[in-house]
Image (cartoon, helix red, strand yellow):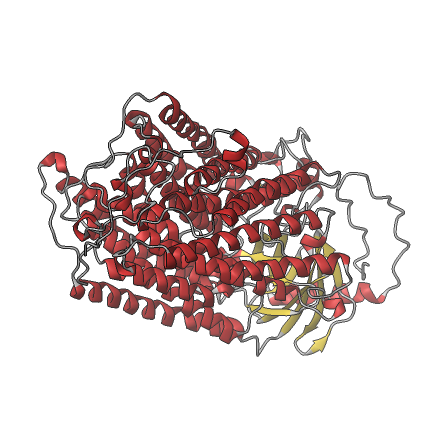
Amino acid sequence: MTRGASEWSPEAYFLNNVALGVCVVIGILVFGAMFISMFRFRKSRGAVAEKWSHNTMLEIVWTTIPVIILIVLAYLATGGLRTFADTTGSEMTVKVTGYQWKWRYDYVEYKGKAIEKVGFMSKLDRESDETRQLNSGLDPNSVKVDGYNTYLINVDKPLVVPVGTKIRFVITAGDVIHSWWVPALGWKMDAIPGIVNSAWTNIKEPGEFRGQCAELCGQDHGFMPIVVKALPKAEFEKWLAEQEAQAKQPAPAAPAAAAPATAQAIEAPVSQGHQG
Amino acid sequence: MAHAATHDHHDDHHGAPSNFFVRWCMSTNHKDIGTLYLVFSLLMFFIGGSFAMVIRAELFKPGLQLVQPYFFNEMTTMHALVMIFGAVMPAFVGLGNWMIPLMVGAPDMALPRMNNLSFWILPFAFALLLSTLFLPGGGPAGGWTMYPPLSLQGDSVAYLVFAVHLMGISSIMGAINIIATILNMRAPGMDLLKMPVFVWSWLITAFLLIAVMPVLAGAVTMLLTDKYFGTSFFNAAGGGDPVLFQHIFWFFGHPEVYIMILPAFGLVSEIIPTFARKPIFGYKAMVFAIASIAFLSFIVWAHHMFAVGLPLGGEIFFMYATMLIAVPTGVKVFNWVSTMWGGSMTFETPMLFAIAFVILFTIGGFSGLMLALAPADFQYHDSYFVVAHFHYVLVTGAIFAIIAGTYYWLPKWTGRMYSEFWGKMHFWNSVIWVNVLFFPQHFLGLAGMPRRIPDYNVAFANFNMISSIGGFLFGASQLIFVGVIVHAVWFSKKKALDRVWEGAKGLEWTVPSPAPFHTFELPPVIHDEELAHGHVED
């Protein structure tokens, strides 16, 4: 796990490290006592068994100390839960919808202004999709973007968002339960048909952040990744304006592309307009 | 306190029935029924294990080499269902059936014919479940957790629901039998607070079973009616809620995992004192801790649902309640260590597995504590970190305890000593390869690998390969166990004493090895000094 790229992601990272530290210390004490006793108190070494079998004070001590440790951990964790739950003050809203087996992103509003008809499907990129077919003969190691292996973690159309902006996600699904997970943002949220969940992020630096569906959703559960592309605000606003302009134009006749028998991805048509 | 009852004369005049069908299909004998459960569970362990081998074989390298994704999902679903309901639970019932009457001085279980039915339901239930793999549409592939709407896709729903109902009925009847036996049929002088910890653990587990198996039955019945009878319990379009299923399922599911570990705690609490030649440390605290864990297990279920969109108050409550379970569990671990400390230990195979349990189950407990912290769980949930956690507590936890209990009591059952050399070979192979198999999965989860996927990015390749190698070797080493058992039952020349182990205490060691078909037909005279917990001051 890394510190992540968002304002909240360090919470999960910090808790992970603190809890791990506590466990390592307790482990050293407990396993240490066990290994010492296995060496010192072996019959082959002539050890004679003690007769005692209880010590109330000791029991109280090793009940109370763990309770105190847990109270400290609970205190550290509660703050993170409360800040995660608070989506107020968001400057932008994006709707995420999970389908079998792809995501849909719709831009709802930005800086208080509703966005019309900017939305698209985002599915596994074609190269990964061809490579992952059973006995494709293709090598996952060679699926790369800019020298970085993106096998099964790349999409045809990423979600584009601005940095330094509190973005509220409203997340739902169209068929079965999915889950939207980008580790760099620090959280995942289930996408449930009939329910709208909300979450937020505020990405600190530009970059591309990759994730995967995190709730079993059928045969291609492992093949519907997520890519979030964070741009500096000016670039994002330019991108958004372009999307809105294209959405206002009538869509050109979509090429009559019959879906191939295998689940191979097709290049998305040029029009960025509302896709069904 | 000695009581004025005649000593048990081991009456062999009417031993086991000579007719094979009568003896094994119409058994009313707790020992034979215990054997049936244990043999069944070993067979299911290998079936569920072979599904795991398919999983690890596909995950050996990135890319899809062996199976289609849908079949992979069938494998993960069936692996869990078979292991949970076919291997772990029946094994504990088998150990309970064999040993509880012996440990409390009873001649048999309270309801011997119902006992027989409880067992024989299971082969039919699993034949039904496993047959779905041969249906045209395949078997269930929505995970053992069966979340709708996904679990309602496909045509094996009815078979799965019926199989689960059958297993549930078996467990409920078995649990009733256990409670009735323990509460009503203890020999005079076997007070509750003098019972072995294993008996206590089963008494409490039986209450959990009766409380929650009906809840599972309700949940799967609602799945059935949603699919076939037009209800909308879990269908938002009809006014229902998919999350409702999750609440109902996990209200069963969380106590279920404690059902799968409390008897293991009991087993370890029998074995360590025997081989440390020292009484269990803090007997009353151990019993009380088991009861506390059982109680707490009812109020933590939503920690399986932290990413579902629970309200903030819910997340906070379930986080705190989940963390609380660490307290009684920690007490138990400290008490096992304190039993070892100051003892005079030898390290026969049962003790090796019991010690490995304490260490490795504790590691599983550590990852459990990390998972309890909800903000961190937003990263761990549905990743391989969870897979690592539950396999540590179930494989190096429950399964190792079952294996330890089998080695511990096998000489009592068969009258012959197993091969200590091969037992140790089984142990060392198991403990090494199981860690190669599951420890890397913590890192896979932390690195961002989700669960239940048949293929993955090359960044996850190395640890997946290591894990798969561990899987193949761990699976292979379980064949040593089969060899040990076969040899002990049919070929071993070394006769076992009645008191097989020098430090062993309790009523089961006062009957001959092998235990006669009927034991304690007259209640035994109980001498407190002979019990493991005869003098209880704390």
Residue A146: in sight, yes or no? Answer: no
Write down the quadrant of residue B189 in the picture: bottom left
Residue drawn at the location 78% of the way across and 50% of the way down = A268
* Quarter the C terminus of chain B occupies: bottom left
Horizontal relation, residue B198 to residue B276: left or right: right
Horizontal relation, residue B414 to residue B472: left or right: left
Residue drawn at the location 16% of the way across and 50% of the way down = B529
The number of numbered badges drawn on the structure is 0
* Quarter the N terminus of chain B occupies: bottom left
**Residue A192 x/y as whole percent:** 66, 63
Horizontal relation, residue B192 to residue A51: left or right: right
Residue drawn at the location 28% of the way across and 69% of the way down = A68
User: Quick one: A3 or A33, which is closer to the camera?
Assistant: A33
Residue B337: in sight, yes or no? Answer: yes
**Residue B93 x/y as whole percent:** 44, 47
Q: Is residue B60 above or below residue A236?
A: above
User: Quick one: B515 or B466, which is closer to the camera?
Assistant: B515
Write down the quadrant of residue B307 in the picture: bottom right
**Residue B177 x/y as whole percent:** 46, 54
**Residue B89 x/y as whole percent:** 47, 47
User: Quick one: A267 or B238, which is closer to the camera?
Assistant: B238
User: Quick one: B379 or B97, which is closer to the camera?
Assistant: B97
